Image (spheres, helix red, strand yellow):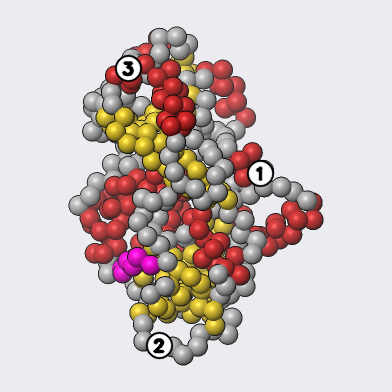
């Protein structure tokens, strides 16, 4: 796909702003812009559950290993951490749908990692504790009896991703935001300014366009996407129909996890697979996830697996998202490349982009996320002859 110049403007939908992408980044960005009075149209390519990272996410609002966080992400993570509870209350009041923000805490069943915390910074480590076996069993009686202890992070919260998206949908409708199902084929431009988007169903005109289409963002940008090396990483998850209170906290061991919901359902996750845009589910992933879960929490095998799904995470080469103005086209903005951190970084990412669009003081220093670095980084990697391996070797530390 390539950008298109504006010719023969046929009658079509006109807005103040178009947001391409109906995941949590796109919807929260639309929410922030609508709060400021803009007429916003969200364009989502199709059924949200089909491959989307947000819908498929486990919704843990922290890295799985809270001290293993890229320093560039810390400002976004801290701001989002302080914002999420109030945001959940706002969305519940506006939509009638509770996204189930719960401060469930996190137990990492790898006590030998405790020394790592001493040399790192994170909003979740200040009150972390090293639990012995007795302390672990008092908090989570059903864990494997052979576990010798755990790292306890009481500040870690979670949110139920599908309910968050539903609450955002209804809240946006309440604010007059239009949501369309269409595949964007290119960006309209007029004298080096953004003018809207081209879809299979026609054109939509707006002087502000935000591309927040996750792993599909580069294809939406077309020729304007040079340097935005987004790499889809598939993650598969399982859902177990357990009973309320069986699992009390988020449990992590060796990159696998259990996430308990209020109604007793428990998520088992997740895989990291370089499969391009293939979004299928596999029996191999089911076996891997169940084996890991049963080792952590043996009683979970007594309950049925009722669903398996996958999503495509938008990986960037350094694990740092692009948030800000496109370097070549005025009025075009980008917010993508959040990899496994889309849910946890979404409030800050949306507010930061709104700050930049309205030219007001930003909540955090935006330079580290500037889309202008895409072409610069691309040239440096090409000169160095680097491969695509950094997508996983760098980003695997993050949630």
Mark 3 near mark 1, Cβ–Cβ under 8 Å? Answer: no
Residue drawn at x 37%, y 13% as measured from the top left? 137
User: Element type at marker 2?
Assistant: loop
Find numbered disc 1 in the image and state the secondary structure of the residue it sits on: helix
Write the start and end of the magenta stretch as one range. Answer: 177-182
Q: Earlier in the sequence, mark 2 or mark 1?
A: 2
| 178 is within the stretch colored magenta | yes
- Residue 98 showing in the rendered view: yes
Distance in Å between CA atoms under marks 3 and 1: 37 Å
Task: Give the residue drawn at x 40%, y 9%.
Answer: 145
Give how far across and how far down residue 221 sits, in percent: 55, 67
Circle 3 residues within 10 Å: few <14, some 14–19, many ≥20: some
SS state under label 3: helix
Q: Of marks 2 and 3, which one's residue comes earlier in the chain?
A: 2
SS assignment for the magenta stretch, majority: strand
In front: 57, or 332?
57
Calculate the distance from the C-alpha at mark 2 to the C-alpha at mark 1: 45 Å
Res 37 quadrant in image: bottom left
The residue to which callout 1 is attached is 390
Within 10 angstroms of label 1, few (less than 14), some, or many (20 or more) residues? some
Is 97 colored magenta in this rendering?
no
Q: Identify whether 135 is placed above or below 98.
A: above
Q: Nearer the viewer, residue 29 or 123?
A: 29
Q: Residue 89 at what x, y percent from top left?
A: 27, 49
Give me the residue at 48% from left, 80% from top. Answer: 195
Q: Which residue is mark 2?
A: 10
Disc nearer the start of the sequence (3/1): 3
**Decide: marks 2, 3 in contact (CB < 8 A)?**
no
Residue 299: give its label.
Answer: 3
The residue sitting at the bottom extreme is 8
């Amino acid at each position: 796909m390539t950008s298109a110049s504006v010719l023969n403007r046929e009658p079509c939908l006109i807005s103040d702003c178009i947001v391409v992408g109906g995941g949590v980044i796109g919807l929260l960005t639309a929410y922030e812009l609508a709060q400021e009075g803009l007429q916003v149209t969200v364009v989502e390519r199709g059924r949200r559950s089909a491959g989307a990272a947000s819908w498929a996410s486990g919704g843990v609002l922290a890295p799985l290993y809270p001290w293993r966080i890229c320093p560039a992400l810390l400002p976004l993570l801290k701001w989002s951490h302080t914002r999420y509870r109030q945001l959940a209350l706002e969305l519940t009041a506006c939509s009638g749908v509770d996204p189930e923000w719960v401060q469930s805490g996190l137990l990492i069943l790898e006590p030998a990692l405790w020394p790592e915390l001493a040399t790192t910074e994170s909003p979740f480590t200040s009150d972390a504790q090293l639990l012995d076996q007795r302390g672990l069993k008092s908090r989570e009686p059903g864990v494997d009896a052979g576990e010798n202890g755990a790292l306890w992070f009481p500040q870690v919260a979670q949110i139920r991703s599908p309910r968050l998206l539903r609450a955002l949908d209804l809240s946006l409708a309440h604010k007059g935001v239009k949501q369309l199902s269409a595949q964007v084929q290119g960006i309209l431009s007029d004298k080096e300014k953004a003018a809207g988007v081209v879809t299979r169903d026609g054109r939509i005109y707006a002087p502000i366009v935000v591309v927040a289409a996750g792993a599909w963002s580069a294809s939406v940008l077309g020729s304007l996407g040079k340097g935005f090396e987004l790499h889809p990483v598939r993650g598969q998850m399982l859902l177990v129909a357990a009973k309320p209170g069986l699992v009390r906290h988020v449990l992590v061991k060796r990159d696998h996890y259990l996430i308990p919901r209020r109604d007793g359902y428990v998520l088992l996750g997740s895989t990291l697979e370089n499969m391009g845009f293939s979004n299928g589910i596999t029996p191999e992933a089911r076996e891997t996830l169940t084996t890991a879960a049963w080792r952590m929490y043996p009683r979970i095998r007594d309950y049925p697996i009722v669903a398996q799904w996958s999503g495509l995470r938008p990986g960037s080469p350094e694990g740092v998202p692009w948030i800000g103005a496109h370097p070549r086209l005025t009025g075009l903005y980008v917010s993508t490349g959040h990899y496994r951190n889309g849910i946890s970084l979404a409030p800050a990412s949306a507010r930061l982009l709104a700050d930049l669009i309205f030219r007001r003081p930003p909540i955090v220093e935006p330079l580290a996320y500037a889309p202008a670095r895409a072409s610069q980084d691309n040239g440096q990697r090409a000169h160095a002859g680097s491969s695509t391996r950094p997508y996983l070797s760098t980003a695997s530390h993050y949630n």
